[in-house]
Amino acid sequence: MPRAPEGEFTVPFEDLDLAAFAVCLTCGHLRDGAPREQRCRCQPRTPEWEKQWRGQDIPSDLDLCVLCVRDTVTTRTRWSWLGCETCRHVSQVVGEWYGHRAALPLGRHSIMNGDVVPSQTATATEVAASLMAAGRRFDALRDWQRVEFDRLAEPLRAVGPSVPLTEWQRRWPPSLGASVDAFDRYGIMPVSDDLDRLRQAQTRFLSTAC
């Protein structure tokens, strides 16, 4: 997939210090970071600040997964994933068992989610209907992210306006079980008992969850 050109301030993802990031307990996005300052939706974006993100589609390095809201995802381009690797795995497995619509639109671009109608054979009405359906699925996932984030953030809001990312993940550790549980509660397609490994991971997760 195409990638945005690297800017002069771009830092390799492996060199990012996760301990430098914080979770905004208002908007649910990551802020701070190093060596570049990342700003959440609550913070102003000035021309001077935007210079460090020149050459990128998305002015950030990391964000929280749109489904489990625990693990991080790398951003930067319009081809970056909204779901973490584990949530994408769960969605892919369920989609392989039950069909494309059982999977979730965890890609930032519709092509990444398989929401493509062949323009050579489809009518304009069919293409428009497909795009509208993809938009509704995406909006529903964003609504879920907001609700799930508020559920996890509520016990931490007495601490202040933000918490370190490391503290967020200590309280809400990412795991296969957490991803399965989030997928299950999202409600498009419950993870069947036939998918034993995923279901067992969820069972273990629920037995130890905070």
Image: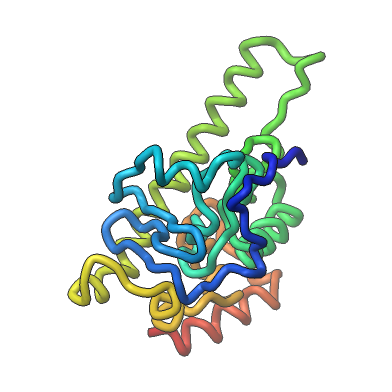
x and y percentages locating residue 154 in the rendered image = 25, 69
Say which quarter of the image contains residue 89: bottom right
Q: Residue 192 vs residue 119: left or right? A: left
Image quadrant in which the N terminus is located: top right
Say which quarter of the image contains residue 96: bottom right
Q: Which residue, as the protein is rendered here, is positioned at the far top?
A: 124
x and y percentages locating residue 115 in the rendered image = 67, 34
**Observer-nearest of 135 and 12:** 12
Q: Which residue, as the protein is rendered here, is positioned at the far left?
A: 158
Q: Which residue, as the protein is rendered here, is positioned at the far right?
A: 120
x and y percentages locating residue 102 in the rendered image = 63, 49
How is the model colour-coded?
rainbow
Residue name at image x 55 percent, y 86 percent: 204
Q: Residue 137 vs residue 89: left or right? A: left
Residue name at image x 46 percent, y 62 percent: 185
Residue name at image x 39 percent, y 60 percent: 31
Image quadrant in which the C terminus is located: bottom left
Say above or below: 56 vs 189: above
Q: Is residue 19 visible?
A: yes
Q: Residue 131 vs residue 93: left or right? A: left
Residue name at image x 36 percent, y 61 percent: 149
Q: Is residue 67 visible?
A: no
**Observer-nearest of 208 and 195:** 208
x and y percentages locating residue 25 in the rendered image = 29, 63
Numbered marks: total: 0
